Image (cartoon, rainbow, N blue to C red):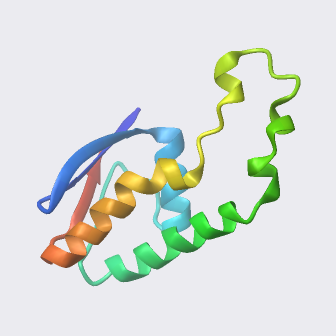
């Protein structure tokens, strides 16, 4: 299942359910089939997402080249960080706040 995030202030993007659920958990939002982050809720959402990205960045294991030892598939060796995965949503939230627009999502 894919989640489509939209705002009138930024280009839309899609995300796999697994990754969207991780972001919803960080934002304290239920993984509903559709939803909205209002302009009033955006500052808290930005803070929560940036704090989670900062926590992940302090995790020494994420920079450990040997953390992927024993992984057979080449794809398993390429860890996508929360900072990379959350960047489109963070950008959308910031742009939406600046333009006073809500962020919505739907399946």
Question: In the figure, residue 53 lies in which quadrant?
Answer: bottom right
- Residue 58, image x, y percentages: 73, 66
The spot of residue 77 in percent (x, y) is: 71, 27
What is the number of callouts on the image? 0
Above or below residue 67? Residue 30 is below
**Observer-nearest residue: 96 or 34?**
96
Image point (46%, 48%), residue name: 20
**In the rendered view, does 65 fall on the left or right side of 20?**
right
Choose top left, top right, bottom left or bottom right for residue 74. top right
Work out whether 52 lies above or below 65: below
Image check: 70 left or right of 27?
right
Question: Which image quarter: residue 79?
Answer: top right
- Residue 23 vertical position relative to residue 70 in the rendered view, above or below: below
Residue visible at 15% across and 71% down? Answer: 101
Regarding residue 60, the answer to whether it shows in the image is yes
Residue at horizontal 57 percent and vertical 74 percent from the top: 51
The quadrant the N terminus occupies is top left
In the image, 100 versus 20, the foreground residue is 100
**Residue in the foreground of this view, choosing between 95 and 25:** 95
The answer to whether 1 appears left or right of 60 in the picture is left
**Residue at the (75%, 49%) spot, across then down:** 63
User: Which quadrant of the rendered structure holds the C terminus?
Assistant: top left
Q: Can residue 107 be seen in this snapshot?
A: no
Residue 15, relative to residue 75: is it above or below? below
Task: Give coordinates of residue 71: x percent, y percent.
Answer: 81, 22
């Amino acid at each position: 299942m894919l989640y489509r995030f939209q705002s009138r202030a930024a280009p839309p993007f899609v995300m796999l359910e697994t990754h969207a659920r991780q972001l919803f958990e960080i934002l304290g939002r239920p993984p509903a089939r559709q939803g909205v982050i209002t302009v009033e809720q955006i500052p808290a959402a930005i803070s929560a997402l940036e704090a989670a990205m900062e926590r992940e960045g302090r995790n020494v294991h994420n920079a450990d080249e040997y953390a992927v030892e024993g992984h057979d598939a080449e794809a398993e060796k390429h860890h996508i960080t929360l900072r990379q995965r959350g960047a489109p949503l963070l950008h959308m939230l910031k742009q939406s706040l600046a333009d006073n627009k809500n962020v919505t999502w739907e399946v």
